[in-house]
Image: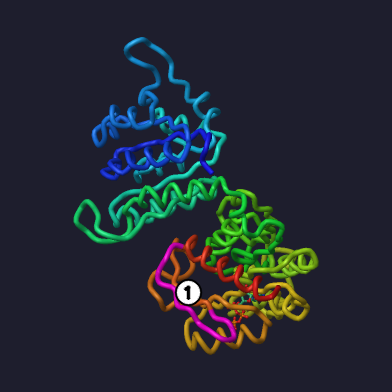
Amino acid sequence: MLKGKHIILGITGSIAAYKSAVLCRLLVSAGAEVKVVMTPLAKQFITPLTMATLSKNPILVDFFNPENGEWNSHVSLGEWADCYLIAPATANTMAKMASGVADNLLLTTYLSARCKVAIAPAMDLDMYRHASTQRNMTQLRADGVHIIEPQSGELASGLVGKGRMAEPQDIVREVEAMFDEKKKSLQGKHFLVTAGATIEPIDPVRFISNHSSGKMGYAVAEALAQRGAKVSLVSGRTALGVPVGVERIDVLSAEQMYEACCRLWAEVDGAIMCAAVADYTPAVVADQKIKKGEDDMSIALKRTHDIAATLGENKGSRLLVGFAMETENEMANAESKLQRKNMDFIVLNSLRQEGAGFRGDTNVVSLIDSESRVDLPLMSKREVADRIVDKMESVLVEKN
Ligand code: CTP
């Protein structure tokens, strides 16, 4: 798979850089041509001589060779590569990548790279789970960077947790998969994903909405697109960027989301309903800003369409997956929604669980179908998305 492929191996200043030697060797043995770019700090962790010998190419650290002034062009390096693999990637480098900082050759090469980019993060567990690192990872994924998840285990600090760089052979496997079009298991399929919060106007300045950030739905859209599916993401209000390969249809109200979903339903192979849709909307939207008076006021609300239930009524052979966000009687409520809306399975999200819910980057969910319930541990929303898509794939196999 990697024979003849041009791979830039970027190494940053982490203790895990010692594994980059084995990684480089494995890539070369698999037939790849490897050029190594190191940050200045990375040289403290592994010697350029080691990496130059293993890659059979001189190491690139500076913008020019201080001996003879020869220019190390990040642009031509970026054009040369079929894949840019940064392993290990420190929290610092990830933060710079996420915000476009380009203060060393490794980063300028990233900004110039037109090829596939993969990073293997390595850091201490607290740095890894810190909100800013998770936010940067979300941004990098949205920018099309493939993240090779770190593993849990003993870390260089002596602490035990998630943050250890993936093993070199696993990294090579993931890089091979990036080149393997056959791994695009959902190629030819088209899915509708709803995400985010709807907005129900009261008057020209006020509205009713909810806390949904859209992160879970966007992660599902990204996971589907990465497996080769065509994805139409009907999105309520969020602050998120559109994942690579996803078509986004922006809507505001539950009614607009309903109309967009009904239009798309005829074209798709299935839908994953992640949006937090308002169940009620003001019966009348005032033309002008409502002025306050002396008395209390109340707003008459009318029911919105239940989008998932509407799609479920006319499901045919399509796949329908929903979410149930509950604060009490979780299981009973989720099972009732599963049946009522004619879904293939439902993802139960309990707001009572720590690490689950609206704004964070992690979630704790259970996947429930008519016969079974699988409780997943706390994981990133992107990992949850992959597990949901895995289950979708097995349901699709059963349906065929
Ligand atoms: N849903 C929808 N249209 C609505 C309401 C919900 O498509 N008008 C979808 C959600 O996207 C989710 C599932 O239905 O996949 C369950 O949503 P949830 O808000 O948990 O349940 P509701 O059906 O609204 O019931 P309740 O508010 O009573 O919990």
Q: Can residue 105 be found in the magenta stretch? A: no
The residue at the point 55 percent across, 54 percent down is 239
Q: Is residue 247 above or below residue 292?
A: above
Q: Position of residue 17 (x, y in %)?
A: 30, 41
- Between 273 and 164, which is closer to the camera in this rendering? 164
Q: Position of residue 129 (x, y in %)?
A: 35, 58
Q: Is residue 53 above or below residue 261?
A: above
Start-end of magenta stretch: 368-380
Q: How is the rendered protein coloured?
A: rainbow
**Location of residue 305 (image quadrant):** bottom right
Q: Position of residue 48 (x, y in %)?
A: 30, 28
Residue type at mark 1 is: Val
Residue behind mark 1? 365
Instruction: Give the class, few, some or many, for how many residues have Cα within 10 Å of label 1's Cα (few <14, many ≥20).
Output: many
- Is the N terminus in the top left, top right, bottom left or bottom right quadrant? top right
The residue at the point 45 percent across, 34 percent down is 8
- Between 249 and 252, which is closer to the camera in this rendering? 249
